[in-house]
Amino acid sequence: MPETTHRSTPFPIVDAHLDVAYNAVVLGRDLSLPIAEIREEERQHPSEDPRADPCMVSWPALVEGRIAVIGGSIFVEPGKRSHAKATTTYTTPDEAHTQAIEQLDYYRRMADERADVDIITDERVLDRVMDNWTSEAPGVGVFIVMEGADPILAPEELMWWAERGVRGVGLSWSAGTRYAGGNANPGPLTDEGQALLHAMADLNLLLDISHLWEEAAYTVVDRYPGPIVATHANPRSFVDSPRQLSDDMIRRIVEREGVIGGVAFNRMLEEGWRPSRPRLPLSRLVEALDHVCQVAGHAQSAGLGSDLDGGFGQSSAPAELTSVADLHKIADLLRARGYSEPDIEAVMGGNWLRVMRQALAAF
């Protein structure tokens, strides 16, 4: 493992949002391979997906970068986009359900087949994953979060998903769901959404508000008694968009002792950025993390939710990131801004471990 990685992060890292299963199941990437081999394969056989970009995430890259825990998403995309799609989308809840099970099964299969992958279902598994980073056989723990709840056919089905490892749910993706409006499709929390919220509370699942329409987000922050986070969202002061979080919403999450994961996507870090422009420096993401800390008044509510390979790849990520293995560089940039070692460790992973434990305590 690179010596610089150890110097930057003597502790393991948590990245709270990665679309690993989507990349494997929908895009067909063999994530058991090193990044260089995946890129070479895709150079020889280019993807037809209009958003294809050099990949940044694989299981070996996660271990190389000391990423001990990921928020492994289950993400299925509604077929409502205007541009042609070469990848799988859904038009009915049943289709969403079937496609989501494929992704859930991918995580479960990886945990069965790979010694370096575990699904984090309770605190005992999380403890084992973290302890393994002091051994010769470190691995990646997957804390499964569903991004957009359309695959849940009814609130009564939520227990079925939880029994199979889901520990967090985002009620909506950007296009919205029948449970709540999304950042690109305004709408409140629906009656079905309220019922799902009650079912989530019974299980104390992690509630992710990353893509919720703001009206719905305020409603759930007021009503949901369990842990509330934004696994992958940046401050609205950087890019004025409903996808970003206002300072007031950041404060509301902070009041609930939640965590906000900074996204390593240039379009969410600078107003008007386009791929034709130079990539932003990684320090811009650190500025976003620092903004959350300044609004909060402490470093206990900021974390990483990079979303690498979540509809963008290397060409749209900050310049110093060649793969997920480079996230450790954020620690040095926080250090240069004067952050203490305990606060750096909190932002790089400790804050996420705290809220994940809150959710896992019920299992």
Image: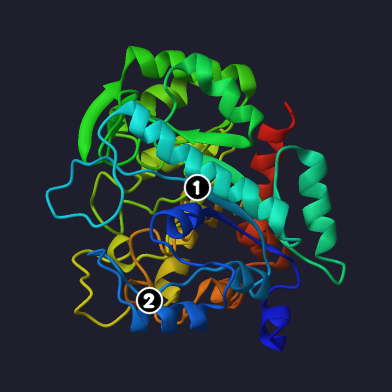
Please state the horizontal and vertical placement of residue 251, each as a whole percent of the image: 46, 39
Query: Is any atom of residue 19 visible in this view?
Result: yes
Please state the horizontal and vertical placement of residue 18, each as a whole percent of the image: 49, 56
Up-down: is 321 above or below 75? below
Q: Secondary structure at mark 1?
A: strand
- Determine which quarter of the picture holds residue 122: top right
Q: Residues within 10 Å of mark 1 (few under 14, many from 20)?
A: many
- Amino acid type at circle 2 is Pro
Q: Residue 54, which numbered label? A: 2
Q: Residue at x 49, y 38 (%)?
A: 101
Task: Decide if residue 303 is on the left or right side of residue 3.
Answer: left
- Quarter the N terminus occupies: bottom right
- Amino acid type at circle 1 is Ser
- Quarter the C terminus occupies: top right
Q: Which residue is mark 1?
A: 73
Please state the horizontal and vertical placement of residue 314, each as a whole percent of the image: 38, 75
Please state the horizontal and vertical placement of residue 152, each as a whole percent of the image: 44, 26
- Determine which quarter of the picture holds residue 219: top left
Residue reaching furthest to the right: 135
